[in-house]
Amino acid sequence: MKSLSLILVILLWFSGCKNQDQLELISILNEERSIFCQLTKMKESIATDWDQMNMLLEQSLSPDMPEAEKNNILKVRNASLIRMFESFKEVDTSVQMALLSLEEKDRKMVEKIVELKAQLSDLSKRKNVLLKKMGGNFMTELAIEQTTPCLE
């Protein structure tokens, strides 16, 4: 009877560990999804900001500027490159300041993206260790949950 109890305790302990691993894996996948959603939101935000900047630029550029040059300025989404255009020096100071502000926001966003990608890398390593430990069978059950779109 004592050995049967020991076997039951061992079996319960292993099943408890598996459930704990599953919970940890779900937590990791939720963190990953949250980060992917943050990255998507950031990408949309900066695209919107650059669209607004391009509208400001377009309104500020001289009407007699060659169309090719105007198109080139408006296609570039890089503050340093935009400032290299001679015609940018002629735009309103408020537009130049808006570009500086957007450049700073871009810089901060790049730092945040690097940080988030490092977190994703760490989560991926943890996830792979857990999957090896669990045999990888649990992922099929979670695949449907992970296709849920970002709700933010």
Image (cartoon, grey):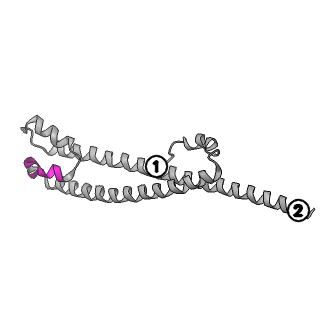
Is 87 covered by the magenta stretch? yes
- Secondary structure at badge 2 equals helix
Q: What residue sits 82% from the left and 61% below the top?
A: 9
Q: Is residue 41 above or below residue 114?
A: above
Q: What residue is shown at x 17% (from left), y 54% (from top)?
A: 96
In the drawing, does residue 16 fall left or right of residue 64?
Answer: right
What span is colored magenta in the figure?
80-89
Point out the tag, 1 or 2, that comes first from the N-terminus.
2
Mark 1–mark 2 contact, CB under 8 Å?
no
Q: Residue at x 90, y 64 (%)?
A: 2
Q: Residue 65 in the image: x percent, y percent?
A: 7, 39
Which residue position is annotated with label 2? Answer: 3
Residue 47 appears in which quarter of the rendering? top left
Q: Is residue 65 covered in magenta?
A: no
Please indicate whether residue 33 sits to the left or right of residue 12 in the image: left
Disc 1: which residue = 36
Residue 102 coordinates in the image, percent (x, y):
26, 54
Tell me which secondary structure the magenta stretch mostly adopts. helix
Q: Amino acid at mark 2?
A: Ser
Answer left or right for 1 relative to 37: right
Query: Dot 1 lies on which element?
Result: helix
Q: Residue at x 16, y 49 (%)?
A: 82
Residue 32 located left or right of residue 118: right
